[in-house]
Image (tube, rainbow, N blue to C red):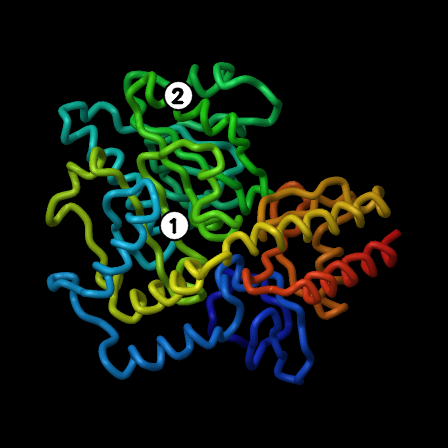
Amino acid sequence: MSSVLGTYARKPISFKEGKGSYLFAENGEKYLDFVQGIATNILGHCHEHLVKTIQEQSKKLWHVSNAFIIPDQERLAKRLTDNTFADFVCFQNSGTEATEASIKIARKYFHKIGKPEKNRIITIKGAFHGRTLAALFAANNPKHTEGFGPKVDGFDQVPFPGSSNTSNSEHTTIKKAINKNTAAIMVETIMGEGGIKVVPDFCLKGLRELCDEHEILLILDEVQSAYRTGNFFAFETSGIKPDIVPIAKGIGGGFPLGACLVTKKVSVGMTPGTHGSTFGGNPLAMAVGNAVLDIIFEKNFLQNVRQKGKYFHEELSKVKEKYPKIISEVRGVGLMLGVRLSVDNGEFMKKLMDNKMLTVKAEENVIRLFPPLIVNHNELDEGIKKIKKVCEEMS
């Protein structure tokens, strides 16, 4: 009997090592890994630059309190702000911590400018923002919140925006939800756990306009999508600038790292003592975060991600056309893709695993596909071949 608390329904398999797009089980069997720690090992397993960075930093300094200046933290923050909308970065250890920081920053901003009554945040049904209590009730998925009452108040939910091709001015449901207590609208740019549902650019523009009109803040949760779509952030194709963006997962390449990016305007309430994290921004995490950016910033790297994502999407769409009774939709952007199925996604995923390919489930009967950004075309083709084989088996 395991002494590990049973909060996960674990597969009866463990892995001894990984390299790039592959994991190797204890018995030596090789698996094509399109889970990658759930969109986290963005450069694959044991990327040489990351391994070298961790080895070198581990010999110098692992942890020091945020009571002191941490040079690599300053460097990573500067690289992030130089390449994004943000003016400041608050480092955390995970996505849910980054989301919590976002909520606190939004509320504190309005308190600071003399409007403490503006403390509620509009969120989207089917979203996922993490497992802390506030993040749970921000998403308010009954499967996740049951038994964890009393409810954390301060959130008002509306349906997923952009479900039809409406104009920017027709976000009527969201607009009706805005009241004198609304501080912000918080949206996942791509809903990961919710089924790889992409908020379209026209909708993001409409949300920005709504926030400007009502003088409230726009929070775009890019915990799962940062770096992965072939742009630095998924929202960049819309041309808008949010006020707050929590990120995590891939930004550490598999090492625990989260961050909250903010504009100068909304940072005014976050003075010394208003927020903190013992491990957030520690030297080891900062070294890894900078190493990931070294690769991301290589010439044509993100362009190649876009090209590979387009190719993978097109090949998956061909499989859908051949097996329309198995695959109903291909979703996503870049290398953050989902396949909506007409058969049980758990059974489909199990058969893929039997064929030595790893995927992960999502809502709306979707399987998520998260190849590492360094995946090559042969590995994508291998994935397509395995998906075709399972489609044939289930036809």
The quarter holding residue 183 reads: top left
In the depicted structure, whether residue 318 falls above or below residue 392: above
Give left or right: position of 60 versus 361: left
**Circle 1: element type:** strand
**Type of amino acid under label 1:** Ile
What residue sits 35% from the left and 76% below the top?
54
**Circle 2: element type:** helix
- Mark 2 — residue? 209
- Work out how far the residue at label 1 is from the one at label 2, CA to CA, in angstroms: 23 Å
**Type of amino acid under label 2:** Glu
Q: In the rendering, at what x and y percent does residue 320 appear?
A: 79, 45
In the depicted structure, whether residue 66 falls above or below residue 104: below
Crowd rating for badge 1 (residues with CA inside 10 Å; few <14, some 14–19, many 20+): many
Pick the front one: 21 or 342? 21
Question: Can you tell which mark lies on residue 325?
Answer: none
Give left or right: position of 295 versus 74: right
Q: In the rendering, at what x and y percent does residue 331 appear?
A: 65, 42
Disc nearest the viewer among 1 and 2: 2
Total marks shown come to: 2
- Mark 1 — residue? 247
